[in-house]
Each structure stands twice: as C-alpha cells, then as structure tokens.
Amino acid sequence: MAHGPAKGIGRWLFTTNHKDIGTLYLWFSFAMFLLGGFFAMVIRAELFQPGMQLIRPEFFNQMTTMHGVIMVFGAIMPAFVGLANWMIPLMIGAPDMALPRMNNLSFWILPFAFLTLASTLFMEGGAPNFGWTFYAPLSTKYAPESVNYFIFSMHIMGASSIMGSINIIATIMNMRAPGMTYMKMPLFVWTWLITAFLLVAVMPVLAGAVTMMLMDINFGTSFFDAAGGGDPVLFQHIFWFFGHPEVYIIILPAFGVVSAIIPAFSRKPLFGYASMVYATAAIAFLSFIVWAHHMFTVGMPIAGELYFMYATMLIAVPTGVKVFNWVTTMYKGALTFETPMLFCIAFVILFTFGGFTGLMLSVAAADIQYHDSYFVVAHFHYVMVAGAVFSGTAAVYYWLPKWCGKMYNETMGQVQFWIAFIGFNITFMPQHFLGLAGMPRRYADYGLQFADWNMVSSIGAFMYGAAQLLFLYNVIATIRNGKPVSDNKVWEGAEGLEWEVPTPAPYHTFATPPQIK
Amino acid sequence: MSAESSYYVPEQSKLPLFTATAMGVLSIGAARWAGGLGGPAIFFVGLAMLVAVMYTWWSIVVKENMQGLVNHQLKHSYVISMLWFIFSEVMFFAAFFGALFYIRVFALSWLGGEAAIGWFDDTPTGPAVANNELLYPGFKDEWPVMITPDQAANGDAAQFIGPEQNMSWPGFANLLTWLPLWNTIVLITSSVTVHFAHTALKNDNRQGFIRWLAVTVLLGVFFLFLQVEEYIHAYTELGLTLESGIYGTTFYMLTGFHGAHVTMGTVMLLIALLRGLKGHFNKDDQFGFEAASWYWHFVDVVWVGLFLFVYVLG
Ligand SMILES: [Cu+2]
C-alpha cells in the first residue's frame, strides 16, 4: 500500500482511503450546507416583509422542514464525520480507519438518502412540511404522500451514521499507536469517541420512531393515535430521546476542534485536559436523561416538569467547565488571531451566549412563554451555527494547509470571518427580541409589530449567506493557487501527531505505527 | 503475509458503492410500495441487488481471512464492531419497549380518566375525569386493551376495533397448550445448543460443533414456524390484527421485529454451519461463528423481555 491514489473518478467512487473519504464527506456536507442555506435564504426572503410576497405558505412549511433536516443530517453531521475521517487516524497514528470499505459505504449512502429526500420537493403534494422534528400527527395523519420517502431516506441515513460511528469507535479503541493511552489522545479524538457512542445509542431510536410512523401511516397501527389507545405525545418522547443527544452529537466534535485550535494559537497546552474529558463524558451521560425539556408545554405531570428542568440545568455545569478551560487556556497565552483562532474565539463567546439562553429555556415555568417562539430559533442557531458551523469553518482553515499543502490567504479568511460574524449576529440577535415579543416560529407571515426586526434579520441572513460563498471561494482559491507550505508544522504552536507527517499529508500515513512517549 | 503482519488496508473496492446503490433502490422501492404509489417491483430489485452484493462482500472477507490477511488486530476490530452493532440493535428494541411501557403506564391511564401519574397514583381527579369524558367517554384503562378508546366512544363506527381475544397469560391450567411458552422453550434451548457448539469448537471437537450448530439452526427455524402459526391463529381466529388498536400494534411490532431478527440470526448461523462444513473454523479462528452466536444470544435475551412484558404480564 505504498502507492498513491488511483487515477480518475474511480479514485473517489471506490476509495478505501480515510483521507479521500474525509474529503468526500467534507465536500458533500458543504454542498448540503449550500442547499440548506439556500432554503434558509428563501425563508428569510419571504419574511423580509409582512404579508406573502414570494411563496405560498404550504411551500414555506416545506422550506423550514427541508432546511432543518438537511442542515442537521446532511450538512453538520457529515462535516464532522469528514473531519473525523481525515484527522482521527492521523491523530492516533493509525494507517487508516478500522474498516475502510465500510467507511466508504457509510459515505456513499448519503447521496442516495439526500437525493431521495430532495426529490420530494418535486413530488405531488410537495416535500415534507411538518418541521424537522416531524411531530405526529402532522407527520402521520396529515402528512403529504412524500412522507414515505422521507422515512426511508432517514432509515438509510441512520444506517450510514451507525456504520460510520462503529467504524470510528473501532478505530479509536483498536488502532491507537503503541503508547497512545486513552488519556493521551487529543481531545478531538475523545469527543468523537463519545459522539460515536451517542450515535450508536440514539440513531436506532430514531429508526424506531420513523418505523412507527411508517406503520401508523400505511399499516393501520395506532402508536401515535389516541383513538386506538396510542398517544401523539409518545412520538415526542421517542423523538427527543434521540433529539437531545443529537444536539450533543453535533456540538461535541465542535468542542474537540476548539480544544485543538485554541491551545495552538495561545501557544499553551490545553488547560484542564482531564476535566475536559470528564466534562464531555458527563454531558453525554446527562444528554440521555433530559429530553422532555423540549416538551414543557405538552401537558406533562408537574413531577416530570420539575425533574426535566433540574436535570437540564445540571448540564450547565460540565459545559461551564469547558468554557472555563478554553478561556483559561487563552489566559496569559501568547495569542495571535489567525482566521481559525478568530472563529474559535467567536465560538466561545457565541456558544456561551447560546448556552445561557438554553438555561433560560430550561426553566419550565418560563419556557411556557418562550416555547415555539423565535427565541427558541435564536437560541439553537447560536448553538448550531455559531457553535457547530463556526468551529467546522475554523477546522477547515486550521487543517486545510495540512490537507492540500497550500496556505489560504489570511486577509481573505479574516474578511470572511468578519462578514460571517457580523452577519450571524444581525440575523439571530433580533430573533431573541422577536421571540420575547411573541412571534411564533414556523409561520410564513407575521403581525406588523414584528416587521422591523424581521427585516434586519433578513439582511443579516443574506450577509451570512454571502460569507459562505466567500468561504467556498477561499477554499478553492487555496487549493488551486495557495502559497505552498512544506513545514510539517504549519502553525508554530500546533501540537499533535498530525503535524509530524509531511505537508501535504501523504496518501498513506503511519503504515508502521509511531512510538508515543 | 503472515497473520501478525501489519494492519490490512484493502485496495479500492466497488462493493461499497454497489451496496449503497442497492440500499438506495431498496428504500425508494419500499417507500413506493408501502405508500401504495407503485408495485413491489423496485423493492424486490433492490433487495436482490443487496443480497447479491452482500454475498459477494462477505465471500471476499472470508477469502481474505483464509489468505491470512486478517491479523490479530483486524480481528479485534471485527469483534468491537460486532459488539457495538448488537448494542445498536438493543437500542432499537429499547424504542419499542419504551413505547409499550409509556403506553401502559401513562397514556392509557390518562385516556381512562385517571390522575396524571398513572400507576403511581390512579385516583381520578376532576380534570382527569373530564379528559376521559370529553375525548373518549366510556373508555376504561385495562391491559390488554380489548375495547379501544375509539370503540368505547363510537361503537361499531370506530376505525380501531379491539381484538376478540389476546395472547396473554392463560393461567396455570392452560399453560402447557400456550404457544408462547413453547416458543420460549425452543429459543432458550437454542441458546444452550449454540453454546455447546461453541464449547465443542473450542475443544477442537469439529463433529460436535457441526451437530450442535445444526440443531440450533433447526430450532431457529422451528421457532419461526411456531411464530407464523401464532400469527395465523391470531389473525384468523382471535381477531387480533395490526389494526386492533394499541394492543395489536405493540404485540405485532415487538414480536414482529424480534421475528425478523431471529430470521437474520438463523441465516447467520446457517452460513456459519455451511462454512463449518467446509472446514472454515478451528479453535483459533472462529469469529464468523462467534459473531453469529453473540447475535443469537442477543435475540434470545430480547425474547425473554418479550415473553415477560408482552405475554406473561401482557
Ligand atoms: Cu434538548
């Protein structure tokens, strides 16, 4: 296996190489990011002014649904799987992923799943229109015909996730170089180990949920129909038993990325490594026992409300440990502010902000006011976009020189950062105000009192969208004409095995495992 | 290459892309067929593609193992992957068991007008009683649900008509003619016989291995036969169908998915048996069989849960 990549398109179609597959994942997720982003632009364009201007309300519902599903399952998750593919074998000194062919299978399922999903837009009755949380009975009794395609694309997408996660777990448990003990693994590897565990635990539950939908819709069962003795609220319980860990599936690898980048540009080791590991594990554990905080208005017994409220608040503790450690890592460091670092600092600030609004939402009594308002939309976009997407962007700028051996243009990177940062805040900060003033989410139209902030928010969204096109330009420009780097260590403060292989990283690395001291 | 050489990283392979294509075709076919938007043709084409490509894939993996490409470390990757795969299956069943528990503990007592905490406190409160009277007057919380809420409120005009009889505990007098008990005996016996096969293999007793494994496969098939009998009986004589409300729903979905997993497990064991007849396994190299046997034990444990919560306490 000393040779390089195969020639032509076959290289990508039939590859077993973790770097190729990582690249495939990253490009696929970026394509989905643009598609989901385009849907977001449609939504914001319609909401630019009150009244219906561009699209019909039915189509608006399809847009919110498709935006959510594609961003969560098509863009963010595969982006981090792409990073995992590229970086985990490099970080632990492994020749490849544990099961390279299954790795490629996990990737190639995704285009089929998302083509099927996207094709529902052109079907009779339109695409799924029940929101990305697809609550029954909206998604069962009142669903468009295309719901069956939605269900099966979720099924194979889930199969892809489970196989990918098992592969990651097997790689981390079994392929570490001699001397690489668990507590010497980079935090990115740790966060992915725990994320993969979460995925293996909850993707089957999602599969169960969509299976029950399938049966209710087509085969006359009554899981979610009270007339037969079932309960629509049951759907919410099952969905959120998956859904809450899902948000950590999205954010934990982001934590790992930030924990790699902040020390590199602070020129200090990560503060409190062990506590970071334990905090990650604690967050993962708690994520299984807090799901009903998404359901405070559903009519749960008061004991349930109280339990889920307190349990949810507990998550702030390990999350606080992490934020504290990142800040303390920077404290008295020799800081420089290259693009990856800027995105990471923005991550720490904005993610913490999103965490605080999450804490507000966790108060059951208060949540009854915030529930399903734009305040919630603002909250989770601070976590999903300023959290996951910012850190993903940081990761690309940070590792791109290692991947392709070319340096991006720092000025252009920083320009992108500032447009993204400002555009993001203009988009989502006003949504807090809208929500607190009573604007409900998922509506195609709104009262006149919400007009000003909606217009501001839409302007910000277009700005943020433009920043992504600039990002695409930056990456392509770097790959084509970037200044070559030949140092193994692209960044002077960066630590880890991935910086000990040549730049650009050879097609095969660590055929014989390195010795870790 | 010797068995302890470096980790085997396979060359380029067309299998993954073909498998993904098969899965895509299969799922589109399934969606069309289930939704009544088209016939089953695409579904079966996808299924055939999947079976063909999986057969090819596993044959190649077996061949690589015979060639000694699979070193100790790679075997360990297989072990880890299989165990985590079984864990994911456990979580799949957890969703359905969770649904059953939620329905029985919470949903039904609320529909029946009992207080909000179900089993823990079933005093009818004002709002709870109103809940019952406004939504489904006359519905009583009982398990198995023989009269659905719909039926209680709307009589024969209801969409969901409860079953005439259920599959629950028949009392000690009728125990020996109770099919689920025999199912349980068959499946638990098969878990023991597969263990005997494993022990025989570890002792290099190949004949014993083949014999016990064959017995296990037969028991698996027999279990499936009994299960089919039970379904036919329930559908034709007990009026218990997927459409008979939440009892039929949970009964068929739990036992049905279990049955599907028994089918998979039986196929895995059958393949292990055929490979064993070809002389593939010995006391140091038996992962293909071991994985199947772990899966079989898992399927068995799920059945014990089913027997308890769907049948005995059903
Ligand atoms: Cu949550």
Image: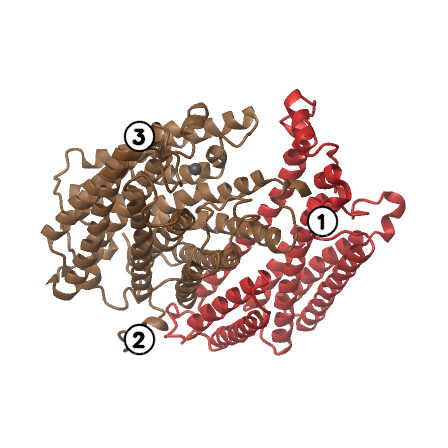
Chain colours: A brown, B red
How packed mark 1 is, by other alpha carbons closer than 10 Å (few <14, some 14-19, many 20 or more), is many
The number of numbered discs placed on residues in the rendered structure image is 3
Is circle 1 on the same chain as circle 2? no
Residue A449's label in the rendered image is 3
Mark 3 in CB contact with mark 2 (< 8 angstroms): no
Say what secondary structure mark 2 lies in: loop
Camera-side mark, 1 or 2: 1
Residue B156 lies, with reference to residue A356, above or below; the image says: below
Residue A187: percent from left, percent from top: 31, 46
Vertical position of residue A160 compared to residue B122: above or below = below
What is the three-letter code of the residue carrying label 2? Ile
What SS does tag 3 mark? helix
Q: Position of residue A61 (x, y in %)?
A: 42, 47
At 69% from the left edge and 58% from the top edge, which residue is drawn?
B191
**Amino acid beneath label 1:** Gly
Mark 1 vs 2: CB contact within 8 A: no
Q: Which mark is residue B248?
A: 1
Q: Amino acid at mark 3?
A: Gln
Residue at the (32%, 36%) spot, across then down: A378
Label 3 crowding class (10 Å Cα cut-off): few <14, some 14-19, many 20+?
few
Q: Nearer the viewer, residue A231 or A340?
A: A231
Q: Which residue is mark 2?
A: A9
Quarter of the image that includes the N terminus of chain A = bottom left
The quarter of the picture where residue A114 lies is: bottom left
The Cα–Cα distance between marks 3 and 2, rounded to whole angstroms, is: 55 Å
Between the C-alphas of marks 3 and 1, the distance is 51 Å
Q: What percent of the width, then of the height, locates residue A52?
A: 34, 44
The verdict on a common chain for dots 3 and 1 is no
